Amino acid sequence: MIEDAWDKGINDIGRFQTGGIRGTRKYIGTPEALALYASLSIDTDVAVLADCPGWLQAHEQLLAYVSNYFNQSATAVDQRIQKTLLAPLYLQQPGHSLTIVGFERHRDGSSNLVVLDPSYETSSAMSALLAGKKSSRSLGSGRRNEVMRAYRRGERHLDRHREFEILR
């Protein structure tokens, strides 16, 4: 579908940058995702978040951006959980892309992105929950953390990067 978009002249710089992707196992980035979205008439825009001297670091901008995005239409489920019908965000960090599906803010003020990362497999604790073998209440706090470990990206992880691109 991306190659078809390029054939139509949609953001075809990606073809030049990648040399084409049809029949390959090449990874795609923001230009390729943007071509796909545009070809499907999915309204999107790109935000580039980068370290700037005297301003917030890229990871701080990213966390604020994602928090604001999900909070714009969130409704409370209970005191601790909010939900939204907003679409996930496409996140490009240097050399790797992820899908942001949520945001966590902790009592101590720290926060995490909740992501789907194609380089991680489903944890055994999450598999057990999905299979109905365990309930989240039956897991101890250590096991509850294990369930979400592969899906969380906090400041320590994000601070490694100086620039991010987001498609929403």
Image (tube, rainbow, N blue to C red):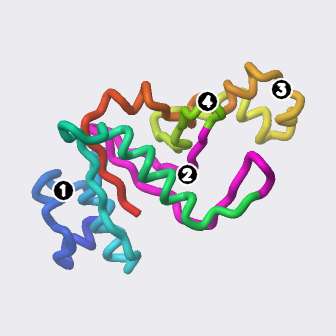
Q: Earlier in the sequence, mark 1 or mark 3?
A: 1
Q: Disc 4 residue type?
A: Asp
Q: Is residue 83 above or below residue 104?
A: below
In this view, the residue farthest toward the left is 16
Q: Which residue is mark 2?
A: 101
The Cα atoms of the two marked residues, 3 and 4, are separated by 23 Å
Q: Which residue is mark 4?
A: 108
Label 3: state its secondary structure.
loop
In the rendered image, the quadrant that contains the N terminus is bottom left
Q: Residues within 10 Å of mark 2 (few under 14, many from 20)?
A: some
Above or below, comparing residue 63 to residue 11 in the picture: above
Query: In the image, what residue occupies the spot 44% across and 48% down?
Result: 64
Mark 3 → mark 2, Cα distance in angstroms: 23 Å
Q: Which residue shows up at 24% across the image and 44% down it?
A: 50
Q: Is residue 167 above or below residue 40?
A: above
Residue at x 36% of width, y 38% of height: 59
Q: Earlier in the sequence, mark 3 or mark 2?
A: 2
Query: Judging from the image, what secondary structure is the residue with disc 2 in?
Result: strand
The magenta segment: 77-105
Between disc 4 and disc 1, whose residue precedes? 1
**Type of residue at label 1?**
Gly
List x then y, in percent, for residue 57: 30, 37
Nearer the observer, 146 or 23: 146
Q: Is residue 45 above or below residue 48?
A: below
Residue 122 seen anywhere in this rendered image of the structure: yes
Residue 139 is labelled as: 3
Kindly indicate the quadrant of the structure image that contains residue 124: top right
